[in-house]
Image (spheres, rainbow, N blue to C red):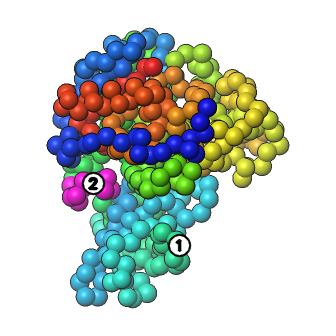
Amino acid sequence: MMHPRELKIENFTYDLPNENIAYNPANPRDSSKLLVYKNNDISTDIYQHISDYLSNDAVLVFNDTKVIKSRLFFTNETGATIEVFCLEPYGENVNYEDYFQKQGSVLWTCLIGKVAKWRTPKLSKILEIDNQNVELTAEIIEKLPDSYVVKLSWSPEEIPFADVVNAAGVTPLPPYIKRVADKADEETYQTVYSEHDGSVAAPTAGLHFTKRILDDLHSKGIETLFTTLHVGAGTFKPVKSETMDEHIMHSECMNITIDFLEHLLENISRPIIPVGTTSMRTVESIFWMGNKVANNPNIPFENLKVTQWEPYETETINSAEVAISALINWIKKDEQSHISVETEIIIAPSYTFRIAKGLITNFHQPQSTLLLLVSALIGEKWHELYDYALKNNFRFLSYGDGSLLLP
């Protein structure tokens, strides 16, 4: 079987007309169209009825990350606007929960718009938080190959960073939406179950879900589990190389609790269906982390990270039950309740799914790693599904419609 390193990205393209791209969300959320691929048939419905297509023993896994207002705008001494786009906290395996409670200053890996106009050591702006003025300053600490390390400092220092970025920033809409987010986007570009600050892009498959849908799922006995992967801007990173061998997969941080792992293990014999590619990356990464622990119970924490090609180059592969159990025991031995670990996993054709049995997802960009993931699940059938969606006026990308894929 072909190693995904050899895949040519030109084989994962299609023509996406501008009129099929959603630049604004559906209202209400659950009125979005739903393409259902089940028993090799394709049909159309709306998200409000999604439970009708799920077996009563299904388990849906949601990503409860919360989008932060990561676009910060400063004005320089000449009046020019400079954008500091916070990508992720600087450092490895950062505990996001603690990071957003930091006081006084933080370091972030950032993109900077109009960096040539940043001629002073620091930029600053005045915010209002709880009826008091707060001064926020930004200082470039280091130039990285494709980004910068920026120190953000504020006074009074006792205010947590979560409050500072919420007051200072703007919601980061996807780059193809050529407008600055407005007040409505603060709500619509956030899932109704978002809880943990950290993402700079929404887990968009979850945007369609409402309390009404969640209540309907529970009334039918369908289990819902929540875990956290903080979505980075790398999710929009185009594949520019001819083959996947030259593409460097972006890294994203997962926060995995023992409670989630134990529920996952209890339900491992049921059809587990991730809601979104980030949830899929999380559950499959959990398997590969657990597989490493099962093969080496004394593995150091720094080796737990799932690397890009690891799933395709691992020889000793355990069952999902063994892998998850091993990971639970490994975390418990240090008396921890959770771990924060990075994953670079790339899910592409030839991948064997270890935990997931289906997927709920939006329609993705041509020549993207997200389209590779869909193809890994349903094979060449993705061409037929995307043709169907285009011909039936489905709306594509982050604010668009979605699909339930049950191969």
Q: In which quarter of the image is the C terminus?
A: top left
Compared across the picture, whether 110 is left or right of 263 comes to left
State the CA–CA distance, disc 1 to disc 2: 25 Å
Q: Where is residue 94 in the image (x, y as percent from the top left)?
A: 59, 56
Q: In this view, does 112 lie above or below 36?
A: below
Q: Residue at x 73, y 27 (%)?
A: 318
> What range of the chain is rendered magenta?
172-182
Q: In which quarter of the image is the N terminus?
A: top right
Q: Is residue 72 above or below residue 19?
A: below
Q: Where is residue 314 in the image (x, y as percent from the top left)?
A: 72, 38
Does the image show residue 243?
yes
Q: Is mark 2 on a helix, strand or loop?
A: loop
Q: Residue at x 28, y 18 (%)?
A: 43
Quarter of image, res 396: top left
Read off the residue under disc 1: 144
Q: Position of residue 48 (x, y in %)?
A: 26, 22
Q: Main secondary structure of the magenta part?
A: loop
Compared across the picture, whether 130 is left or right of 267 comes to left
| In magenta segment, residue 304 | no
Q: Which label is found at residue 34? A: none
Q: Which amino acid does label 2 sit on?
A: Tyr
The answer to which of marks 1 and 2 sits earlier in the sequence is 1
Quarter of image, res 176: bottom left
Q: In this view, does 115 lie above or below 86?
A: below
Q: Where is residue 63 in the image (x, y as percent from the top left)?
A: 46, 37
Quarter of image, res 77: bottom left
| In magenta segment, residue 181 | yes
Q: Which residue is drawn at 60% across and 15% down?
A: 269
Q: What residue type is labelled 1?
A: Leu
Q: What element carries label 1?
A: loop
